[in-house]
Image: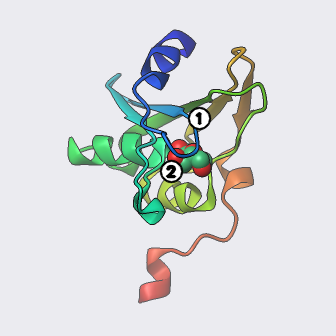
Amino acid sequence: MYDSLKKLLDKAYAPYSNFPVAAIVKTKDNKYFFGVNVENASFGGTICAERNALNSAIGAGYRSSDIQELHVLVNSTKHAYPCYLCRQTISELCNSDMIIKLYNIDNKVIEVKYDDLISFPFEKENLK
Ligand code: THU
């Protein structure tokens, strides 16, 4: 997984932050979806790697119960946890039994529990 993430990292479009991020979603039927961060001169238009990978899986027809793993690599020796917008997206598009692994550039991996990452999300029940 690390080698695929590392290759993917080169595709990140991060001219403003110089902080490339790569993400891979694995589905239960062994399909892989890829995402990198894509920045914009209008900074709010930036999309994170995690959301790009997850949205790509959704666009292919997969849903939360199909998504098994999310892997994220940052180009830094310091691990980075997904931003809170990505956490909100994970809460919508993934189930709590998924595996989330965070890689640093030295291939040190931290596995984080969904419930530790996502506490008190805004959810569809709130809209009823
Ligand atoms: N970024 C991600 O792709 N994922 C995260 O969870 C944190 C931040 C990106 C967004 C932006 O392009 C750059 O990292 C710096 O914030």
Outermost top residue: 3
How far apart in space, not on screen, are marks 1 and 2 (Cα)?
9 Å
In the rendered structure, the answer to whether residue 105 lies left or right of residue 38 reads right
Q: Secondary structure at mark 1?
A: strand
Badge 1 density bin: few <14, some 14–19, many ≥20, Cα 10 Å: some
Q: Quadrant of residue 112?
A: top right
Report if the beta carbon of the residue with label 1 is closer than 8 angstroms to ligand 1: no
The residue located at (42%, 54%) in the rendering is 93
Residue under pointer 2:
95
Can you give x and y, in whole percent of width and height, for residue 36 in the image? 43, 36
Can you give x and y, in whole percent of width and height, for residue 58 in the image? 29, 48
* Front residue of 13 and 7: 13
Q: Amino acid at mark 1?
A: Ile
Can you give x and y, in whole percent of width and height, for residue 1 in the image? 52, 15
Question: Is the residue 114 above or below the residue 87 in the image?
Answer: above
Q: Quadrant of residue 108?
A: top right
Outermost right residue: 78
Report if the beta carbon of the residue with label 2 is closer than 8 angstroms to ligand 1: no
Residue under pointer 1:
99
* Front residue of 24 and 78: 78
The residue located at (48%, 58%) in the rendering is 89
Badge 2 density bin: few <14, some 14–19, many ≥20, Cα 10 Å: some
Q: Quadrant of residue 111?
A: top right
